[in-house]
Image: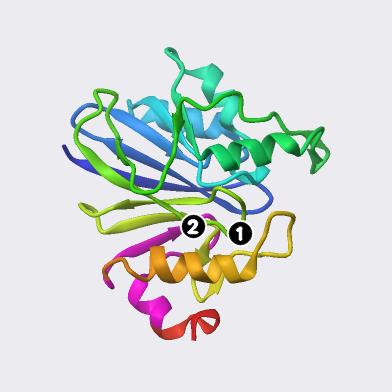
Amino acid sequence: MKLEIVRMVLGPLQNNVYLLADQETAEAVIIDPSFEPKRQQEEITRRGWKLTQIWLTHGHFDHYVGTTALHKAFKPAPLIGMHPQAFAWSNEQKNIVNFGMPIDPVPQVDIPFTQGQRLAVCASGEPKVIEVREVPGHNPGSVLFYCEALKVAFTGDAIFRESIGRTDFPGGDYSLLLKSIREQVLTLPDETTLLPGHGPESSVAHEKRFNPYLA
């Protein structure tokens, strides 16, 4: 197994969309498919990869808006992974219209995420190199994906470089988010690279030292 990460910055909110692929099997996962799903599809195809899974960190529309289009674009349809609370919350936001366009809801969840769950990039289900960690507070059912082999964590909107996710939206809880970060992010090895849903990457060591919200 040889894993590769590709970052795409897309849409009006400059979302980070991540492709995580096994170069040996050419199977790929997409994390938080945001706006411009056609560009995401073209990038996957250009690299000769097969999209087999879609993983969603949380239920805010800008992180899942491309899910339905990508789910339809690939055959067989990729499996969708999301925390049940995030899926339920996102479906409660009825008739969402943002940026002048309707937002298709997440169509289904094939892989319900839970704390400590182990995931595989390959459809065969092995090896399980990704750990799911629950980080609620920014949004109900938020999760991050930690890959020890690559020393990276895909953190969604839980934490950013020297900042944290907003908690003034519906479903936000400032105290809970800080608790989640301290228990699930800062307990990762210091050298872990943090790959957030927006903005530049960081590291656990950097956030311990410089994040003003965690002082």
Say which residue label 1 marks: 138
Residue 202 visible here:
no
In the image, residue 173 lies at what x, y percent?
65, 64
- How packed mark 2 is, by other alpha carbons closer than 10 Å (few <14, some 14-19, many 20 or more), is many
In this rendering, is residue 44 above or below 145? above
Residue 156 visible here:
yes
In this rendering, is residue 1 above or below 177? above
Q: Nearer the viewer, residue 143 or 23?
A: 143
Query: Mark 1: which secondary structure?
Result: loop
In the drawing, what numbered circle is on residue 48? none
Q: Amino acid at mark 2?
A: Val
In the image, residue 72 lies at what x, y percent?
55, 17
In the image, residue 77 lies at what x, y percent?
46, 17
Query: Mark 2: which secondary structure?
Result: loop
CA gap, disc 2 and disc 1: 8 Å
Identify the residue shown where x is 47% and y is 50%.
Answer: 143
Identify the residue shown where x is 40% and y is 85%.
Answer: 209
Q: Quadrant of the N terminus?
A: top left
Q: Nearer the viewer, residue 77 or 119?
A: 119
- How packed mark 1 is, by other alpha carbons closer than 10 Å (few <14, some 14-19, many 20 or more), is many
Residues marked 2 and 1 touching at CB (< 8 Å): yes
In the image, residue 9 lies at what x, y percent?
53, 50
Residue 33 picture quarter: top right
Say which residue label 2 marks: 135
Q: What range of the chain is rendered magenta?
A: 190-208
Identify the residue shown where x is 51% and y is 76%.
Answer: 162
